[in-house]
Amino acid sequence: MRRKRIAYFICMIMLVTMFSGCGTKKGATEELPPGPVSYEGLMDSFKQSAKEDTVTCWYASEGDKAWLAAAAADFEKEYGIKVNPVYYDGVSFFEDMNQANQKGEGPDVYLTGNDQLELATTSGMAEENTWFDDAFWAENYPETAKRAFNYQGKQYGYPVYFDTYCLVYDANLLETAPASIDDILAFLDEYEDTGSTKAVFRWDVADPYINSMFVASYANLFGENGDDATAFQINNEQCVTAMEYFQSLSAYLWMNKGNISHDIIMNRIKDGTLVLGLCKSDMLPVLYEMQAANQAAQPEQEGQGEVQNPEEQETDNQGEEEQGQNEEEKKDSTNYQVAYVPSLTAELSSTTFSTTYGAMVNPYGKDTALGNMFALYLSYGNAAKQFAGNGKLPVINQQEGFDAMQSVIYAQYINSKPVPKVMVLGDYLSESGITYDAIWSGENAKEQLDLLQEKMQTKINE
């Protein structure tokens, strides 16, 4: 019944869009500039076709507010076009957009994750991106981003920034990042806690999004591009083996799934009581803050060992004692770095999900030319200011503009699998969460995966 209600809702949106006050779809340009596609050529073409002087952009993440405000100011300064950023805090994004479209108040462009692409396209509120040719895609965007915004063989929107997972580890305790979870277990066998009460390895084991890394290399999660709801297979032999390995970690790592969350892991890294953790890429700004704090404290620590004025000099014994304390502080300090998410074992690989966020053009906005123009600006023209604006790395490779840690996370993104964009993704995440929980708690891995396969087939066929 739930699937039927969703289908009915989508049909109603399409009917309302076609026959009510949404108006006529507006083409972004009358014709493309001749020759190879370029950023400058597209921006000029969009601007020449624009009929309004203001572009409206909807966004649903509070973290984007300052970034969008700064981007809007830069855009207006460079192109003379005002931007009206509108924060959406409702619960029915596309339904509310449809209502706004009927009143002539819909956005020209909006920000959303690639996991919403099927709903966006099926409801008729995503304009196809026909402006990029293959050469422009290949030159400026990784294949991961292109796949993320491909639905049923068509490209939509403009990739802007992304989220994925990475491994955070204390380089003071590990000379090199572990290549596999087996390597982490070997380190655990040798690790001696000196009283700092450090946990060795943690991740949010209740999160099906991250737990999918155990099976994503071997399961068929809605087809190659994540847009085929009928293509689902998660109970093959390799998936079972991977989840049996997942289960073995339950006893070995002494993790209470009810007492671990991403926020708790972040806090343990902040206070230096974790050796390794799987973290979302939004951990990166936190690591920079920690590094800055350590660097600010370093001159003060080093100054403790400098020779002072004779009148101020302490006794030799007291100086040696302070120096010993200083060395102990350095020994106990942390030096967190990022690395690729490790494979499971030498034989079993891991594959992380990523979510790509893009600027989508609303075909029923007041000016689709301006919608395309601002979307392209956010994706390409503003990329160098992306991380400073909202702590997210841009989809476009900044190359020398990326530092060492950013380059690692970007490489992790390139090798990730775009999160599926089908509407049954929510069913997969909820049902797989139940399955992973049962397997972690000791239930038979094959039986649980078979049950998950059966449940998902029922959901898909509804």
Image (cartoon, rainbow, N blue to C red):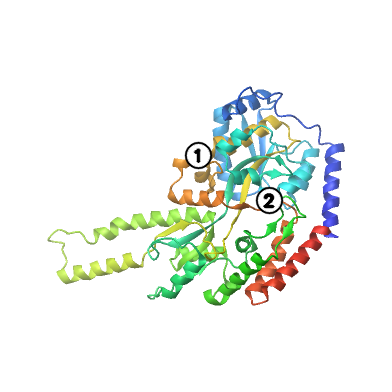
Residue underneath mark 2: 224
Asked whether the residues under the numbered discs 2 and 1 touch, taking CB atoms below 8 Å apart as contact, a structural biologist would say: no
In the image: residue 431, left or right of residue 396: right
Closest to the observer: 54 or 234? 234
Q: Whole-Å distance between the Cαs marked 2 and 1?
A: 31 Å
Closest to the observer: 3 or 454? 454
Binning the other alpha carbons within 10 Å of mark 2 as few (below 14), some (14 to 19) or many (20 upward) gives few
Residue underneath mark 1: 384
In the image: residue 155, left or right of residue 415: right
Residue for point 79% across, 44% down: 123
Q: Position of residue 229 (x, y in %)?
A: 76, 54
Where disc 1 sits, the SS reads helix
Closest to the observer: 275 or 233? 233
Residue for point 86% across, 46% down: 12
Tell me the quarter of the picture where residue 426 sits: bottom right
**Which numbered disc, 2 or 1, marks the residue closer to the eye?**
2
Where disc 2 sits, the SS reads loop
